[in-house]
Image: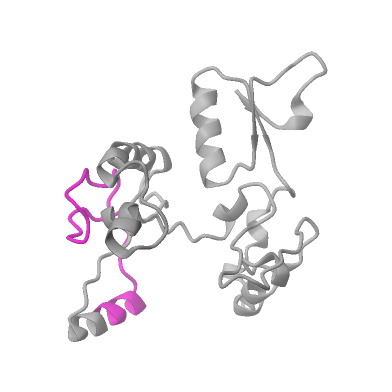
Amino acid sequence: MAVALDALTAKERADVLIVGAGAAGAVAAAYLARHGVHVVCLEQGGWTNASDFPGTKPEWELLAQKSWNPNPNVRAGRADYPCDTSESDVNPLMYAGVGGSTVLYAAHWVRFLPSDFRTHTLDGVGRDWPFTYQDLQPYYHRIDIAVGTSGLAGDPAYPPTTPPPLPPHSISAIGRKVAEGMNKLGWHWWPAPNAIPTRD
């Protein structure tokens, strides 16, 4: 059973404490709780009310660039803390609150490519992972089921795999226009999988 910290009584003890219930922590908490483990999740920041999301408001573009920016240095919310990025080429993408960065990540649910596990061998960069895409593939499928991934099977950029458990979302008018442009350039494109279920 997963419970909020304030729901625990003085006599109750958790078997597992998960710090940060974002994409990884939430899945781990759900899995453990389903198997009878008493789990407590700690988050930095509170719950986000869905009515606060800017997507339905006329000023959504302004809100997305300030109050909902993925960079806490820009967003500067009450639960945020500054990150020193002066020596980094990459800004943080994080959210201090229940759900962590899943509140901001748009549910884009892509896998690494097989070559991503062998960057040292193939490109002389970093280190190779101690396992391969093929080793991880069954777990990718399990997580697809757990989160309700929607997508279209058969992307030739990846090895053959089990199809996503749910059908893909439709492509918007803007997406179709982008696809037309990529077709003219001879670029490969594929409807990306999403951790947004298309049906129950």
Of 56 and 32, the residue lying toward us: 32
Residue 129 in the image, given as x and y percentages of width and height: 37, 47
Residue stretch rendered in magenta on the structure: 151-179
Which residue lies at the image location 28% right of the left edge and 41% below the top edge?
A: 137
Q: In the image, is residue 103 above or below residue 24?
A: below
Q: Where, quadrant-wise, is the C terminus in this rendering? A: top left
Residue 162 belongs to the span the image colors magenta: yes
Q: Is residue 19 left or right of residue 107?
A: right
Task: Decide if residue 83 is on the left or right side of residue 146.
Answer: right
The relative height of residue 179 versus residue 110 in the rendered view (above or below) is below
The percent position of residue 181, horizontal first and vertical second, equals: 25, 84
Residue displayed at 21% across by 72% down: 188
Q: Nearer the viewer, residue 20 or 57?
A: 20
User: Residue 60 location, x and y as percent?
Assistant: 61, 75
Asked whether, in this view, residue 136 is left or right of residue 104, the answer is left
Q: Which residue is drawn at the image coordinates 57% and 46% (left, top)?
A: 22
User: Which one is nearer the viewer's eye here, 119 or 153?
Assistant: 119
Residue 112 magenta-drawn? Answer: no
Among the 4 quarters of the image, the one containing residue 187: bottom left
Magenta-colored segment: predominant secondary structure: loop
Q: Position of residue 56 (x, y in %)?
A: 58, 69
